[in-house]
Image (cartoon, rainbow, N blue to C red):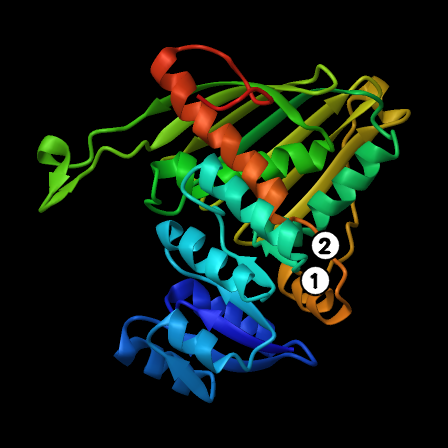
Amino acid sequence: MRLLILGTGWMAQEHARRFGAIEGVDLAAAVDVDEKRVGEFADGFKIPKRFTSLEAALDWGDFDAVANVTPDRIHHPTTMALVAAGKPVLCEKPLAENFGKASEMADAAEAAGVVNMVNLTYRNVAALQKARQMVQAGEIGTVRQNWLWRLSRGHGSNGVLGDVGIHILDFASYGAALDIDHVFCRLRAFDKAPGNRIGDYQLDANDSFAMTLDFANGAFGVVHASRWATGHINELRLRIYGDRGGIEVVHNLEGSMLKACVGANVETAKWELLDAGTVPTNYQRFAEAVMSGVQTEPNFRHAAGLQKVLDLAVVSDEKRAELRANADTQ
């Protein structure tokens, strides 16, 4: 598989390292509007071709798939052009700025019949995959409640909600193997500088959010994310409670952990650490999907559904109202 990397910022380096280590994947080209940056990136990863426009790369065309690592607002126009050219795409999160654009991307990819994935990186966490298997196998019974907590690492296009919200919702709904029906959200921005301004930047993006979710089976979810949680760096916790037991997944910079309270341990509230094994990464699964021609998850349609929930979260905060996730977006 000859891969083109579109966008050569920090995250693109991770894509280059990950894809470069996969047998059968050739880093064929890189694209960035900054000629100096794309040159340094291509030289650093021994990528033979480099372009300063996607149009020039498409005119060349000698690549099989694309890792789209452009800024959020660029995902939609570039991916639409790539899909129109019949190129499989692994797009960074969030898929687009809003549900309308994300849905259009999913429609286009499905109509073109090209492999499409979104890099929801917590799918790489073995503990989450194992937790999902346990839920689906009925080891904790019917899911009743889902708690999630996450610390952000920096400003995104829509604060904590836009930066990590899509990861959180995927982590919660995927781990619990449930779809989201309703959402209620409150957003909060904290004072961070005099007048909440630094130079030309108005610091008005949300720094924390609290969200409640109703899942398709009637389970209730509570989600909280914040830039400030002393003692926790880029940490995520997922707790899933069923009528026959509970599961907890913890993932942070030190690794991941899976614990369960099931069976006879429920009576004594004893939690046991489980071996989750290992799982293939999104990079490996995308490469395999492109080479086999078999679509895999998480795809554009799934990410568009998550984007819809994020859009509704903003409206929910503005209206102070619970909104249906399966209704038309206002």
Q: Nearer the viewer, residue 159 or 235?
A: 159
Is mark 2 in CB contact (under 8 Å) with mark 1?
Answer: yes
Number of numbered tags placed on the structure image? 2
Q: Secondary structure at mark 1?
A: helix
Residue 228: image tag? none
Q: What is the CA distance from the residue labelled 2 to the residue labelled 1? A: 7 Å
Q: Residue at x 46, y 89 (%)?
A: 48
Residue 121 image point, x, y percent: 58, 52
Q: Quadrant of residue 128?
A: top right
Residue 96 image point, x, y percent: 45, 45
Q: Which residue is mark 1?
A: 285
Residue 87 image point, x, y percent: 58, 67
Q: Residue at x 66, y 63 (%)?
A: 286
Q: Residue at x 56, y 54 (%)?
A: 119
Q: Which of pointers 2 and 1 lies earlier in the amino acid sequence?
A: 1
Q: How would you rate the neighbour count of disc 1 (Cα within 10 Å): few for under 14, some for 14-19, many for 20 or more?
A: some
Look at the picture and state if 143 lies above or below 253.
Answer: above
Q: Residue at x 38, y 79 (%)?
A: 41
Q: Give amino acid for label 2.
A: Thr
Q: Nearer the viewer, residue 219 or 262?
A: 219
Q: Quadrant of residue 139?
A: top right
Q: Which residue is mark 2?
A: 296
Look at the picture and state if 248 lies above or below 325.
Answer: below
Using the rendered image of the protein, determine whether residue 112 is visible from the camera's viewpoint.
yes
